[in-house]
Amino acid sequence: MPNIHELAQQRAEAVNKQRAMLDKAEAENRGFTNEEEGQYNELNNTQLEIKNRISKLEEIEAQERELNSYVSEPIRADISRQPLAINALDTGEYEAGFMNYVQGRSSGLDIKAGLVEGTEDKGGYLVPTKLQNKLIEALENEMVMRQICHVTRTETTTDIPMVDTYGKATWTGEGVAAVATDDKFKKKTIRAHRLSRVIKVSEELLADSSPNIQQHIAYSFGRSFGEAQEEAFLLGDGSGKPNGLLGSAPVAKVVSGQTSISLDDILDLRSSVKSSYRRKGSYLMNDLTYGSLLKLKDANGQYIMQPDFKVGEGDMLRGKRVNTSDFMPELAANTSAALFGDFSQYIIADRGGIALRRLNELYAVTAEVGFLMWVRVDALHLQVDAIKQLKTAA
């Protein structure tokens, strides 16, 4: 049976053939023929099937590594008689016990939750599923990056095999041996950075209403976590936080001005991205930048462009969705004016669950209780050339 590396090479071969077909059609300024469409779809089905096999192998190998870390001899459990697992965080019993802990009615010992990895000296309890969903909803309301990027979950530091250089095909005559040119692989690593915050809640509010305190915790933590993550996913320097897109996305063009861009500049940015990524591409810019584009007029005082709208898709610019973020820079000297590309190539990886710890004594003199909550997250720009940026002059 092929291992993960061998499967990754097989998948790379299929993807390489897809890319060659796309580039050929693009160079000839045409679409696929019926025969090419069938070949492309067959290749796509092949690489997706291999991707699924890799995912399953990675999952089972991670589980086996975890089990084998406990004993000297490898463990392979007999699953024939194992009952289906139930996630404890989904149960009403766990939720009730958790809220008793939050409101100070119990020490938390009755909650069957493990300590969060990497924080054994400062143990907290995992947040129940319903409250986690409220937190995530509040978090996503503050972010566009989680809406347009690929979000996944990891349990350990994860290495992702990547094709660094594709082998080249060569023309060979009759009776001439083909030249072997292998694809070269590298790996990128997803780790985890801790993001935390403490809030204070009055003992009186805690005693009054558990639904209200759930809503308050979800909104307060979700909002602040969302803002911090959005900033890091765009501007992060990798020091104690994820690396942001503005530090890794190649610069497609530097415009001549410092405080203005033209529609031509935006279209140049779009055309700089490879067609395979451009098909799924969208824009990301500051609200004020997008507003300045909408105000461009011709010599007769008519607006050059009109945004087109599709239900559920928001503003569209020449058929591509426009996303805006408060953490994209405003137009100024030597700043990123806009990003364009396939944002699914930027992976956001959540490690484990959301954890909370009650701080009973820290604010006791003011009749308040502190709550420390933390998440662990990282992000990785997978295919760097899938997203490019437009910059202003220095």
Image (cartoon, rainbow, N blue to C red):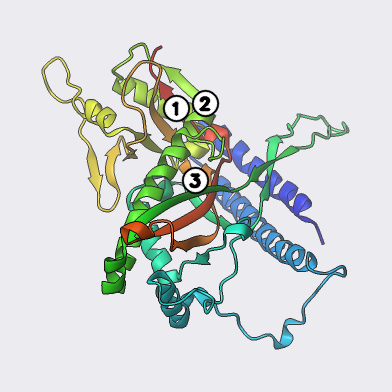
**351 or 61, which is in the foreground?**
351
Check disc 1 and report the residue beneath it. 389
> Between disc 2 and disc 3, whose residue precedes?
2
Q: Quadrant of residue 358?
A: bottom left
Q: Identify which residue, 2 or 157, lies in the foreground.
A: 157
Q: Residues within 10 Å of mark 1 (few under 14, many from 20)?
A: many
- Quadrant location of the N terminus? bottom right
Residue 138 is at least partly visible in this image: no
- Left or right of residue 224: residue 295: left
User: How far apart are labels 1 and 3 at the CA level?
Assistant: 16 Å
- Vertical order, 335 against 198 (above or below): above
- The residue furthest bottom is 81
Name the residue at 33% across, 55% down: 220
- Mark closer to the chain start, 1 or 3: 3
Marks 1/3 in contact by CB < 8 Å: the verdict is: no
Q: Which label number is shown at residue 250?
A: 2
Earlier in the chain: of badge 2 and badge 1, it is: 2
Question: In front here: 212 or 308?
Answer: 212
